[in-house]
Amino acid sequence: GDGGGDGGDASNYPDQNITVVVPFSAGGPTDTVTRLIAEPMSEELGQQIVVQNVEGAGGTVASGEVANASADGYTVLMHHIGMSTAPALYQDLGFDPLEDFEMIGLVTEVPMTIVARSDFEPETLEDLIDYVTENADTVTLANAGIGAASHLCGLLFQDAIGVTVQEVPYEGTGPALTDLVGGQVDFMCDQTTNTSGQIAAGEVKAYAVTTPERVESLPDLPTTEEAGLPDLQVGVWHGLYVPAGTPEGIVTRLSDALKVALADQGVIDQMAELGTAPVPEEDATPDAHRARLEEQIETWGQIIADAGVEQS
Ligand code: MLT
């Protein structure tokens, strides 16, 4: 089918360390999910997995790098929903998400939360909408660069309320959250895998979660639909990629190791604590991953075009 080159010998794979590239800062949400599954995958594959953070341009720098890496299974990319929004957001991306990668499988779909510095005035999502509308000139919104999940969610928020605010880009929401806790920036949209701890500790103010259902680990937090912004729905799906042309046997080996990691009770428990869960086993496959990416490129391409976003 789509997947897999025929070159190379997969039978000895892997016989050296595998690098998994994370397209955002260490300590942030993508990094956290990657490190969670890296350990059981590494055990299953019998080789060390080295996590490497390659930041820049909302995840597109790392994607371009991995697209051009050797198709030998030793350079893997963890990326999220940003893989599907980038084609609509960038004029000259330099890689094609569907042509330049083999998909390994989906990993998890992480809810987002709308959070603010703890002394930010608005108390509820409705307050926030009013406040941002009235103070559009001064309010600041953090994100992890154009193409990041936080960027997409912030864009949907601004589009839904018809207001544009000043955006402050970071190389990941790890550092953005640090600044939010420190009060250097007002609010942002970020994944529960990054915000759960600070919400529980009261270090940030939380307004809503962007999924149709409440999140079990944050039971008091209303959904955007409950809180008055039903159009703001985002689930940050993640997947693993290798360069196009990677031998099918290697793709299968990685996909099988991913399935083992996602069935690991420690992974399930830690994800639950962070407000998320592994995808069902049938989604940790190249075919399910490719189908999701195709559908999401369509969906977000349309939404981004309708919102009139200018390409970078
Ligand atoms: C990160 O790891 O920093 C995030 O996934 C950034 C984002 O996409 O908002």
Image (tube, grey):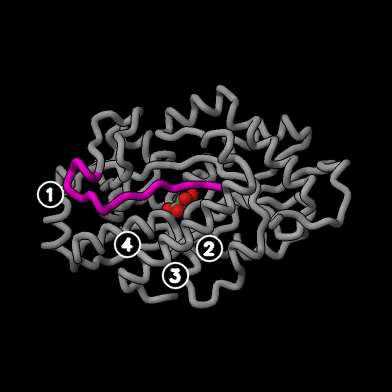
Q: CA distance from mark 1 to mark 4?
A: 19 Å
Q: What SS does tag 3 mark?
A: helix
Residues shaded magenta: 224-239
Q: In the picture provided, is 115 more to the left or to the right than 285?
A: left
User: Contact, CB < 8 Å: mark 3 with mark 1?
Assistant: no
Label 1 vs 4, first from the N-terminus: 1
User: Contact, CB < 8 Å: mark 2 with mark 1?
Assistant: no
Q: What SS does tag 1 mark?
A: helix
Of the residues tagged 1 and 4, which is closer to the observer? 4
Q: Which residue is mark 4?
A: 155
Mark 2 is on which residue type? Gly
Image mark for residue 89: 3
Query: Which part of the image, by quadrant, shows the N terminus?
Result: bottom right
Q: Which residue is mark 2?
A: 56
Mark 3 is on which residue type? Leu
Image mark for residue 127: 1
Query: Which part of the image, by quadrant, shows the C terminus?
Result: bottom left
